[in-house]
Image (tube, coloured by chain):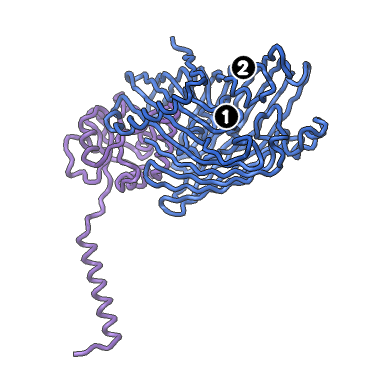
Chain colours: A blue, B purple
Amino acid sequence: MLTSLKLMIRPTKVWSYSIGTILSVSVAIAANAAEINNESLQVHGFVAQGVIDADGSNYINDDESISFELTEIGLNASYQINDDFRVAGQAVYLNGGNRYHPGPRLDYLLLEWDAFHNEAWQASFYFGRVKNIHWLYSSVRDVPFARPSIIIPQVTYFDGLRDLGVGGDGAAAKFTYNDDELGEFDFNFSRGKSSFSDEQADVVVGEFAFGKVEHDLDTQVSVYWRPPYSQWRFGVSVNDASFGYQQAEIDNFFDSDFTLQFYTASALYEGEFWQFSAELVQERLVTDGFYFPGFHRDTIGQGYYAQASYQLQKELSVMLRTERFYSNKDDKNGSQLARNSGGLVPAYFGYHNDTMIGLTYDVASNFRINAEYHWMQGGARLSPVVQPDPIANDSKNWQVWAIQFMYWF
Amino acid sequence: MSFSVKNKDEIIKAIFIQIAFIVLLTSPQVQAINIISNITAETVSLSTTQLRRIYSMRQVHWQNGTPIVVYVLSSKNIIHQKFCKEQLRLFPYQLDRIWHKLTFSGYGVAPIEVANESELVEAVKSTKGAIGYVENVLEVSDVNIIKIDD
């Protein structure tokens, strides 16, 4: 029985060749998409390139210069084997500068088993590398035209923990229930383990920690509900994850265990001209070890984002977002964090705020341009989060702007 | 023969009303969207909620167990837009969002998009379990016409 497909593309020197390969295959397939798509086989993909600049932080790069490190390319295929089984996979190449390690990734590769269905219920199981479907945009966070903006709310979709939050190797189950009186329900469950490359470990724990980061099995559950004929959809999710740090022979840090419990509650409204979405987040992070043997810290962070978009013209819409997060609910302004670190970590590393305005212009039905500006405050969502870098991020206030062109088929 | 300015305005107004009336009479009739399926579906009627489930890929089998193959026109097509609003009571972008999410996360497949109405009819005719929609059902044969109950 296929319980785990552990296929990994090593992020080595092959990545520079992989961009070209994925790109040329994407273009060739896009040209022949009409012939390839039939009832059993479907092939889709996307190509996106942008320009981005972060002033006052090392969010994108260390010298704070204008960057083209905003590349996302993906190619997927789905094949229906018979009435009950389907296989699907997607390869992506991502480059987001310092946000996460650049390179090709096997995004998902799964076997779907349509186990049960009747008029009201449908139960499907997925085995292999599966994506996180538990938050509003988690399954499409790397799909430029399917997410709400270029930089999505860091309170929920923290780039520093991207590889932990994007999915893992294991299994998922999806149960949908439809009722004319009660509406539509989705019950999702997944259990898996994310792969952590050395490059991604640097993003999480910093380059001065020479050891290895291992992600243990994590469990996620979510429920979504849309009332009958409603333009609203509501959801809640729970994630219980743990990962360990194994110190190197010569290291500045020590063996440690981290536990991350992540809870969300969300609402989505889809009107003819107005759209609205919001997620409330609570994050519990328990640290045992790392800074010195016997160190213990248990903090609860909280935050939210709310965003609204309005269709100005048929092809043009504007989005406004506000986002607030503090990493310790008992230290909202970060003063305790600054005191405990003897002043080494400034108080603004205790929180993260973002106010964003963005524009979306649909050039054609599968070609879009996004542009946005962020006024950021604080460093709680800057990597490496377990070891803040107050030298590279010496400003409480910092800004990001980005423009991205995207095509999909 | 001469007209006062007031009479002249009234005559011009009357001419415009006549022209507007003639244009309305001669313009193509506003047609309702009809749902069609392959004859293997064996379903004669669906409720609006069932149709929504099928197009949002939440119901993937007909009552007789045949897998449903969903065909659509481009989301920019006026017939597709009418179908979404009138039959599904959804906006086209809502369906696009559902289908993108399924396609690019691996958790499902999107409907098959065809270039025009005649291709859609041919696809529904020739594909086991297929469903689609047309504006003028009188010109279509060899398919099931599905009645939609509210």
For residue A237, what is the image quadrant? top right
Residue A102: image x %, image y %? Answer: 53, 28
| Neighbours of disc 1 within 10 Å: few (<14), some (14-19), many (20+) | many
Q: Earlier in the sequence, mark 1 or mark 2?
A: 1
- In the rendered image, which residue does mark 1 sit on? A100
Residue A256: image x %, image y %? Answer: 71, 17
Q: Which mark is residue A214?
A: 2
Q: In the rendered view, does A382 fall on the left or right side of B132? A: right
Is residue A173 among what the camera can see? Answer: no
Is residue B91 among what the camera can see? Answer: yes
What element does badge 1 sit on?
loop
Residue positioned 33% across, 20% down in the render: A83
Chain on which label 1 sits = A
Q: Amino acid at mark 1?
A: Tyr
Residue positioned 56% across, 27% down in the render: A101
Chain on which label 2 sits = A
Q: Of B17 and A204, which appears nearest the observer?
A: A204
Query: Quick one: quadrant of the C terminus of chain A?
Result: top left
For residue B75, what is the image quadrant? top left
In the displayed structure, B31 sits above or below A268; it is: below
Q: Which mark is residue A371?
A: none
Pointers 1 and 2 within a single chain: yes
What element does badge 2 sit on?
strand
Mark toward the viewer: 1 or 2: 1
Residue at the far top in the pictured view: A1
In the displayed structure, A392 sits above or below A288; it is: below
Q: Of A41 and A283, which appears nearest the observer?
A: A41
Residue A306: image x %, image y %? Answer: 59, 43
Q: In the rendered view, does A375 fall on the left or right side of A335? A: left
Report, in whole angstroms, how far the alpha carbon at label 1 lies from the one at label 2. Answer: 17 Å
Residue B46: image x %, image y %? Answer: 32, 36
Q: Amino acid at mark 2?
A: Glu
